[in-house]
Amino acid sequence: MSVKEWWDNCHKTNNEKYLTGTNLESYKIHYQLSNEDIDNADVFLEVGIGLGTAIRDLHIKSKTVYAVDISEEALAKVGDVAITYNINDIAELPTNTIDIAFCHLVFQHTDKKNIEVIIENVLKSLSMDGKFCIQFADAPGRNEESDLCKEKGGMLYSRDEILEIVYRCNGKILWEPAIQKFDFTQAWWHKIVLRKV
Ligand SMILES: C[S@@+](CC[C@H](N)C(=O)[O-])C[C@H]1O[C@@H](n2cnc3c(N)ncnc32)[C@H](O)[C@@H]1O
């Protein structure tokens, strides 16, 4: 089964464990965004939409929302409230347009080449004051044989690895919320908010 088929299947069966369903209020907390940040922004983008919860929250606020996902099954479910693009067409997003973009709980399922494609094209799509909010996972002291990588099939990246891509794509860190640590897993969540240079 390909990665795309695996995600299609999650979306067909509404697999909440893997699709999560992070809402806009949680994004505000994760990325230290204020009500004003949200109210002043008109155009939003989410790459990797899960159950589409944040997309619908933004739609209720009458915002223009772009949705990008690997799965057409996912995109079909938000077609009534968002402008949708398959990840293969991410380069076709309008340039200089998006005020706030999110990519949350996606890099831990994505290889490095695709991460670069996402960062490069989302940065291009940002307005001059636009912000790109990204989460990625790492684990302290991990190595190639790490149990986390092997058991869960997760992709872990160091901050340096992600920042190397960000700088190559002409991105700049605006701010970096504190690393989030959990009791139930060794994995850490890094979160960064980027702008284009
Ligand atoms: C764990 S869910 C996260 C959903 C949402 N961002 C949240 O936090 O609730 C991962 C989502 O990313 C999508 N996805 C996985 N790999 C992707 C890729 N390479 N490009 C775009 N979307 C991808 C999946 O179909 C799924 O909708």
Image (cartoon, rainbow, N blue to C red):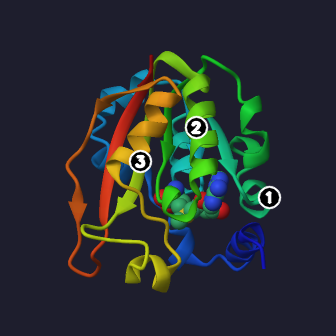
Q: Residue at x 66, y 20 (%)?
A: 95
**Where does the C terminus fall, quadrant-wise?**
top left
Distance from Cα at disc 3 to Cα at disc 1: 30 Å
Query: In this rendering, would 124 be left or right of 4?
Result: left
Q: Find residue 15 and report its horizontal and vertical position in percent.
A: 61, 78
Q: In this view, does 116 lie above or below 69?
A: above
In the rendered structure, the answer to whether residue 49 lies left or right of residue 79 reads left
Q: Residue at x 46, y 34 (%)?
A: 166
Tell me the kind of residue under disc 1: Glu
The residue pinned by badge 3 equals: 161
- Earlier-in-chain disc, 2 versus 3: 2
Q: Measured from the top left, where is residue 105 in percent x and y?
A: 47, 60
Q: Which residue in the structure is indicated by mark 1?
A: 72
Label 1: how many Cα within 10 Å (few below 14, some 14–19, many 20+): some
Tell me which amino acid carries mark 2. Answer: Leu
Q: Using the image as rendered, state which of residue 29 and residue 63 is in the foreground.
A: 29
Residue 138 placement, left or right of 168 = left
In the foreground, 9 or 141: 141
Between disc 3 and disc 1, whose residue precedes?
1
Q: Nearer the viewer, residue 193 or 110?
A: 110
- Mark 2 near mark 3, Cβ–Cβ under 8 Å? no
The image quarter in which residue 192 lies: top left
Residue 101: x, y in percent?
51, 36
Tell which circle, 2 or 1, labels the residue nearer the N-terminal end.
Answer: 2
Please, what secondary structure does the residue beneath circle 1 have?
helix
Vertical placement of residue 151 versus 99, above or below? below
